[in-house]
Image (cartoon, grey):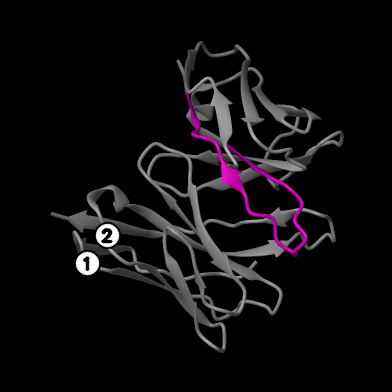
């Protein structure tokens, strides 16, 4: 259980174009989804948190107009990288969690999307 | 968020127990300790989490010291497929009082299981 998928797994695009990445929770309803970015040989950095039906909360330094997040349903969140530039090339990973009776929500991660901007 | 300290790397022989330490001396009373691992170019995989008591599941055991300042993840019989970066994370609710439980990843420990 608790499977999260991402699509596409790998994308190459030209500078200036926009790229959409989908994150789906396959066997549970995710009250919250998170988007992370990971540069080579570095750890995961949280970009934003989104609750279904609400606007995403972005971490400091992450441009909300550049990284558009939509969380329209309890099983789907999308991240759109607008006007992508080579420095946006990275490994983008989503995670999903659901409310539990305990004060802790385990996050289950997707397999990641490798974005390369030429 | 509780800041955690882990060794940069460790080696373990295949079939032996792998004991991965983590210091989290600043953890607060309501912060859980989570362990995830990440195999190269994949998303992190949840392993186990705990608050005060020791925990065990099909993947690993988590031993938390009584003062909660440190913990140890134990993989009882390491295999080559357990080679990964292991992250010890103190999870916490957002300081803004929101309903989101955030994880802050550090650099983790690269565990290499050798044949």
Question: Which quadrant of the rendered structure holds the N terminus of chain B?
Answer: bottom right
Give the percent coordinates (x, y) of residue A46. 62, 46
Q: Is residue A96 magenta?
A: yes
Residue B34 seen:
no
Seen at 40% across and 57% down, the residue is: B86
Q: Is residue B98 magenta?
A: no
Give the percent coordinates (x, y) of residue B60. 42, 63
The answer to whether A105 appears left or right of A41 in the picture is right
Estimate how packed mark 2 is, as few (under 14), some (14 to 19) or many (20 or more) residues with alpha carbons within 10 Å: many
Q: CA distance from mark 1 to mark 2?
A: 6 Å
Whether residue B27 is situated above or below residue A42 in the rendered picture? below
Query: What residue does disc 2 label?
Result: B78
Question: Which quadrant of the rendered structure holds the C terminus of chain B?
Answer: bottom left
Seen at 52% across and 77% down, the residue is: B54
Q: Are marks 1 and 2 in contact (CB under 8 Å)?
A: yes
Q: To which chain does the residue with label 1 belong?
A: B
The answer to whether B12 appears left or right of B84 in the picture is left
Give the percent coordinates (x, y) of residue B53. 57, 79
The answer to whether A16 appears left or right of B102 in the picture is left
Seen at 84% across and 56% down, the residue is: B98
Check if mark 1 and mark 2 are on a common chain.
Answer: yes
Query: What residue does disc 1 label?
Result: B16
Q: Magenta segment range?
A: A94-115
Secondary structure beneath dot 2 equals: loop
């Amino acid at each position: 259980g608790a499977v999260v998928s991402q699509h596409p797994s790998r994308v190459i695009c030209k500078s200036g174009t926009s790229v959409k990445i989908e994150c789906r929770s396959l066997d549970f309803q995710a009250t919250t989804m998170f988007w992370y970015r990971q540069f080579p040989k570095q750890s995961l950095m949280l970009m934003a948190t989104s609750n279904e039906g609400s606007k995403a909360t972005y971490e400091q330094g992450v441009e909300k107009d550049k990284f558009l997040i939509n969380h329209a349903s309890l099983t789907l969140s999308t991240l759109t990288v607008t006007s992508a530039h080579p420095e946006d090339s990275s490994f983008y990973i989503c995670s999903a969690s659901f409310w539990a009776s305990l004060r802790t929500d385990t996050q289950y991660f997707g397999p990641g999307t490798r974005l390369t901007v030429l | 968020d509780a800041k955690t300290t882990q060794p940069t790397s460790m080696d373990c022989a295949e079939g032996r127990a792998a004991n991965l330490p983590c210091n989290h001396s600043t953890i607060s009373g309501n912060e859980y300790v989570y362990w995830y691992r990440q195999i190269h170019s994949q998303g992190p995989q949840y392993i186990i989490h705990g608050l005060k008591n020791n925990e065990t599941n099909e993947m690993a055991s988590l031993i938390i010291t009584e003062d909660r300042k440190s913990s140890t993840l134990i993989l009882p019989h390491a295999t080559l497929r357990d080679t990964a970066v292991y992250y010890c994370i103190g999870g916490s609710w957002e300081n803004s009082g929101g309903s989101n439980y955030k994880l802050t990843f550090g650099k983790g420990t690269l565990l290499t299981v050798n044949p």
